[in-house]
Amino acid sequence: MPGRSTDPPVSRRALAGLGAALLALGLLGCQTSPRLAPEQQAGGPPAPASLAPALAQSIDDLARSGARGTDKAGAEARHRALVAAHLPALLTAATPPHPAAGVQDADALQDPAQLAGVRPVLRPTGDDTGLRRSGVGLPVVARLPAAADPNAPRAGYHLPATLVAQPRAGSAATAAALADPDAAAQVPTAAGTLPIAMDLRAPIDATTATGIRPLAAIGNLLRPGRFRGEPRIVFLEPFQPDKTPLVLVHGLLSTPDIWKPLVTQLWADPRIRDCCQLWFFYYPTGQPVPLSALQLRYALDDAVAHTGLDRPMILIGHSMGGILSRAQVSGIGPTRAETIVPGVSDLAEYNRVRRALIFEPRTDVARAVFLFTPHRGSRLAANGAGALVIRLIQLPDTLLNETEHALNQIAGGESRRLPTSIHGLSPRSRFLRALDATTPTVPVHSVLGNRGRGDGSSGSDGVVPVSSARLAAAESEVIVPTGHGGFDHPNAVAEVTRIVLLEVEQQRAAAAPAQP
């Protein structure tokens, strides 16, 4: 059958060695799939008259506890439990949204009637500085359905909210409001002005924007043809036109879930939350690298067209994701493409092979950050472990039939097999060589890893040599003492934060009216 490999069947010994081979590649990110507690819908009987004095007492206890550790934690836990026990009635009281319960900022109010449900956060896990805040109210995970939004997570958006409830002045009734705790920081009460409780970590743990099902990374590598739907951009939160998109592009044997450690640290910085929105590119990682770069280009085009985005993006790519990101800010013309696949420039304009190898740089990207990126390849993609995984990858017949002859030359023309992503990360990859000969059209930055087993030039992150991760055109370079997956290292996070804030500040300065 055209496009089928003529290699002999993979032996049981080879299959048994798959786990070792994947570990040797050093690119596996642990996948988690958090389980939500049952959600509670808005609606239900009115809150009893006894709730108002109980709320008043719990708020007074919160105010009196001050900064005293165990006293404060206990008072807050009792207050949360009291609000949670009357959750349906208080959500009804908060519908429709209006300034109530002391929350005066109408822009910070949310309508419970628009939600598919909420999950109370009674026992936060971990100690995430910047993502949580003690105070009045019950933090909840609010699930917003978004069936008409092509960039929404498949289960809808999981958003942070806080149900604030306190006695209504001069009556036995209770006032309630569902607030965005990042927009409304404090609330006046009879016991004084107090902070509104906040938990931004629980929605991140709950969202399917990063929480792809377990083992999906391996399936997307070995069976890219079974990838569900089309590669696409997924938003962490609904689109916000006044914020700069940070587009996170994962690498080989990964899914967007790999970004969670970085996301939690970036999102803990209120400066980042104030100016940025997070987008994730999700795609099957077993297919040829130029095709994945083309799919990223298409996915970004679709997201921009749907949202009407009018501000430049920042691309952040890890490992192979850095190669895909570099292809967005570089151009390969017909002459250079001929060094990859002779005759490619003669193909029709609509041909996928031609579009994957001949392209112009995007004009809507402001900067690119390359994290542990093998610009000149990695020998692990060409050694025994890489060769084993290559034999196990099965590309879809549609791709094989369409591109067998042309793409077979991308990896160097040494194999009769259609090149996979691992072929494309070899130092012999013609596509990598052609891309490396280009100069990015926007400022780019490099974050490299070095485990300390060599000097600054001969070191490695265990997968990518420093010499391959370096880029002469980079505006800045930071070497982090960590392995290939160490993009959440404090030094790496600090550098990404610096770059993002630098770009946002420059955008604001450019948009500011000229002073006389």
Image (tube, rainbow, N blue to C red):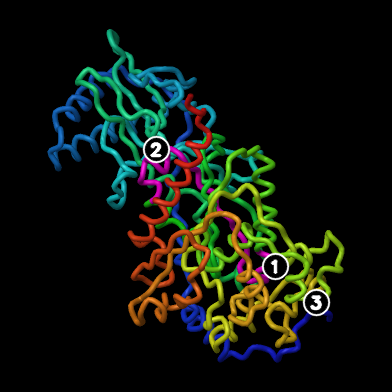
- Disc 2 vs disc 3: which is toward the camera? 3
Q: Which mark is residue 425?
A: none
N-term-proximal mark, 1 vs 2 = 2
- Disc 1 vs disc 2: which is toward the camera? 1
N-term-proximal mark, 2 vs 3 = 2
Q: Residue at x 72, y 83 (%)?
A: 417
Label 3 element class: loop
Q: Which mark is residue 140?
A: 2
Q: Where does residue 454 sit, x and y in percent of width and height?
A: 36, 82
Q: Residue at x 84, y 60 (%)?
A: 349
Q: Is residue 165 left or right of residue 377?
A: left
As rendered, which of 192 and 475 lies closer to the eye? 475
Q: Where does residue 136 sit, x and y in percent of width and height?
A: 28, 30
- Looking at the image, is 233 positioned above or below residue 431? above
* Three-letter amino acid code at the position of disc 3: Pro
* Three-letter amino acid code at the position of disc 2: Val
Q: Where does residue 198 sit, x and y in percent of width and height?
A: 34, 37
Rendered image quadrant of residue 351: bottom right
* Three-letter amino acid code at the position of disc 1: Gly
